[in-house]
């Protein structure tokens, strides 16, 4: 292809198109417009730039051999060659570190985060709910990316004969409410969406599914949990956690942390004081309109603090007990019974276990007194 001839042909066609619907009766105005069109006012000179060569790295074998990437990635991206900047980004992503890629069109930016997400999901086959939310500015990009994901799925299934273990889906205004409802009931691992739909998912507080976590579209993870769970000596002093294997220990710790996070206060010096709550309430009423704002009789409540001792009636704190009759207490007693763990949870035994658990979670930097 001769790029200059192609450019001239396009300009000629475009010029003919523009002239076809211009009909000016005034001769002077017509001459001015003709001169402007002839001089190329509407079509500037072509821009010529050098396209820098991007340094290649090679195939996926080295990354798979070093366990930087899961072995199944080789089947998903079969035949792919990687650039060095892709490898540098993937090495960060697969170790849980943030990265930003700035490179030209067609340089494989998408592959860096997709590869990192796939590695995480393949390495954690029991993962449920949405693990990754990929946000695009336009639905056209979502549709294009969905086709890419479909191609990856086909690559894997053709190569292995097995079903693709990663579920993906797009959540936009194109699908209709029925399709989106099905996705909320059976959420994918990877959610492709745009910023407007994501905002609605996060803020639509009066619908049946109030936010990503409540409708199982988001799974909350705790920082360094796997590393902390693997510290057997740390947990050995607990008659409950010390007898569990890593998988059961992680599940139990996550359940207890979820309970604390959802039922009690998040530590903050700026946003959980009564004056700050009142200021936030005022801002909501002034800035938001129905149906997003608070109802006339609705208030932001001060969060509950965890209590294991009775407070005096004059104490001005919102508290919830975590005693044997609380939901946490009932859960722990049921857990111990179902797993036939030999722990005395009567009277002081329960409180000793709870206080020890609180202290250990605080030492692990998950709770703050």
Image: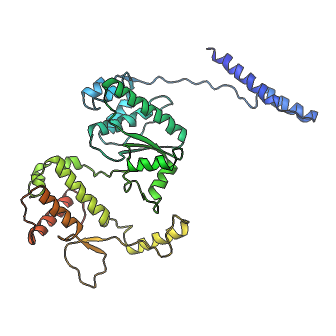
Residue at x 7% of width, y 62% of height: 343
Work out which residue is located at the far top of the displayed protein and give it: 1
Q: Position of residue 314 (x, y in %)?
A: 28, 85
Q: Is residue 169 left or right of residue 340?
A: right
The quadrant of the rendering that contains the C terminus is: bottom left
From the viewer's side, name the closer residue of 2 and 247.
247
From the viewer's side, name the closer residue of 183 and 93.
183
With respect to residue 101, does 358 lie above or below? Answer: below
From the viewer's side, name the closer residue of 188 and 321.
188
From the viewer's side, name the closer residue of 187 and 98.
187
Q: Is residue 359 visible?
A: no
Residue at x 51% of width, y 64% of height: 292
Q: Position of residue 341 (x, y in %)?
A: 9, 57
With respect to residue 248, does 271 lie above or below? Answer: below
Q: Where is residue 176 in the image (x, y as percent from the top left)?
A: 52, 47
Residue at x 47% of width, y 71% of height: 281
């Amino acid at each position: 292809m001769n790029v200059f001839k192609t450019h001239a042909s396009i300009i000629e066609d475009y010029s003919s198109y523009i002239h076809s619907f211009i009909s000016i009766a005034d001769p002077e105005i017509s001459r001015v417009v003709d001169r402007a069109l002839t001089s190329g006012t509407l079509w500037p000179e072509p821009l010529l730039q050098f396209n820098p060569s991007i340094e290649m790295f090679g195939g996926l074998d080295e990354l798979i051999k070093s366990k930087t990437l899961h072995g199944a990635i080789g089947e998903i991206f079969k035949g792919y060659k990687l650039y060095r900047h892709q490898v540098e980004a993937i090495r960060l992503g697969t170790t849980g570190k943030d990265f930003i890629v700035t490179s030209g069109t067609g340089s494989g930016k998408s592959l860096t985060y997709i590869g990192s997400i796939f590695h995480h999901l393949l390495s954690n086959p029991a993962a449920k709910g949405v693990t990754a939310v990929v946000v695009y500015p336009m639905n056209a990009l979502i549709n294009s990316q969905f086709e890419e994901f479909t191609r990856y799925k086909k690559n894997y299934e053709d190569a292995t004969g097995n079903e693709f273990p990663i579920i993906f889906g797009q959540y936009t205004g194109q699908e209709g409410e029925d399709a989106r409802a099905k996705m909320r009931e059976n959420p994918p691992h990877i959610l492709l969406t745009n910023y407007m739909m994501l905002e609605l998912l996060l803020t639509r507080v009066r619908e049946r599914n109030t936010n990503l976590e409540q409708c199982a579209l988001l799974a909350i993870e705790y920082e360094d949990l796997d590393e902390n769970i693997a510290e057997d000596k740390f947990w050995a002093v607990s008659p409950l956690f010390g007898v569990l294997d890593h998988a059961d220990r992680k599940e139990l710790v996550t359940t207890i942390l979820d309970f604390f996070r959802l039922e009690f206060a998040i530590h903050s010096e700026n946003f959980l004081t009564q004056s700050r709550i009142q200021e936030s309430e005022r801002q909501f009423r002034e800035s938001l309109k129905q149906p997003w704002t608070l109802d006339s009789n609705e208030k932001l409540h001060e969060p509950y603090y965890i209590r294991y001792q009775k407070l005096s009636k004059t104490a001005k704190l919102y508290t919830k007990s975590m005693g044997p009759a609380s939901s946490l207490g009932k859960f722990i007693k049921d857990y111990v019974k179902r797993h036939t763990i030999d722990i005395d949870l009567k009277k002081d035994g329960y409180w000793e276990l709870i206080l020890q658990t609180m202290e250990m979670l605080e030492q692990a930097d998950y709770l703050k007194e």
